[in-house]
Image (cartoon, rainbow, N blue to C red):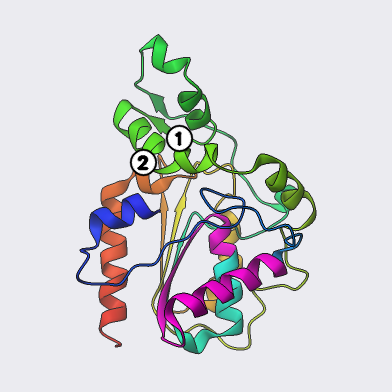
Amino acid sequence: MKGFIEKIIPDNDYRKVYFDLPGMGKTTTAKQIYKAQEMYDIIKCFIKLAIGEEKYILAGESYGGYLSRKLIKDEPEKILGAMFLCPVIIPKAEERNLPPKALIYDNIADNEIRESEVYKNFMDTAAISDVEILNEFEKNIYSGIKNGNEEFLSKYYQHGYAFLENIDEIKEPFEKPALFIAGKQDHIVGYEDLEKILNNYPRSTVCLMDESGHNAQIEKPEICKILIMDWLERIGRRI
C-alpha cells in the first residue's frame, strides 16, 4: 500500500506511518505470535509507540482490513476515519463467498516475462495484465511477498488467523467517514460478504470495481485515487 499512497498524498499534508505485520515484508517474526490476538496486541503497541494517544486515520489492506476492524471495535473514539482495501471480511477461507478466478485480459506476450517468478506470482491474483501493472506489482507487492516468512505464515494461517470473537459485533455504528474498495474478480477474499458489515459503517463509500482482483490499487489506480482523496476530504471536514 505504501507505494500507492505515497503517489497520491503529499508528504506535507499528513504524517504517514507504515509497518509490515510480523512475518510479512521486512518485519521479523516474533516467536510468541501464534494467534490473531497476539498479532493485534503487537499492532496496538506499535501504534502507541508511534503516535502515543493522538487520534489517527486508519487504512488496512487485505488481512490488515480485518485487523483494522478490531481496532474500530475496541477504540473507535481514537479513529478519525477508516479505509479498507480489498479487506478480509470472513477470516475462514472456506466460508467466504468467492467469485471464480478470472483473467479478463492479458496483454503480456513476452515469453521471458511470462516465465519469470514475478509473473507467476502476479497471475495468482491478477484480473487484468499488462507490463505497467506487472511492474507496479513487482515494485510494491512482490517485494513484500518474497520477504515473507513462509513457514511462520503457513502455521499462522492454519491456526491463528481468526479472532475467537466476532469483531464485527460492535456496540454502535462507526459514525465517521469510511471507504471500502473491492474487486469484482477478487477470488482471494471476495466482495459479496461486504454487505454483512456495512450497517456498521453508515458513512461509508463502497466501490466494487470490475476488472479488479485482490490488488485493485494497481489495476485501477486512478479510480482508487479519486476515492481515497474524497475519503480524506470527508475526514477533513470533521476535524
Q: Which residue is mark 2?
A: 219
Q: Position of residue 176 (x, y in %)?
A: 42, 82
Mark 1 sits on what residue?
A: 127
- Give the residue drawn at x 51%, y 49%: 26
Taking the magenta stretch, the answer to whether it contains residue 67 is no
Q: Amino acid at mark 1?
A: Ala
**Magenta residues?**
37-66
Q: Element under label 2?
A: helix
Position in image of residue 228 (x %, y %): 31, 63
Q: Position of residue 218 (x, y in %)?
A: 36, 43
Q: Residue furthest top?
A: 111
| Magenta: main secondary structure | helix
Q: Residue 213: tell me if it is visible.
A: no
- 207 left or right, relative to 235: right
Say which quarter of the image contains residue 38. bottom right
Which kind of residue does numbered mark 2 sit on? Glu
Is there CB contact under 8 Å for labels 2 and 1?
yes
Tell me the distance, in whole angstroms, between the alpha carbons under discs 2 and 1. Answer: 8 Å
Residue 99 seen by the camera: yes
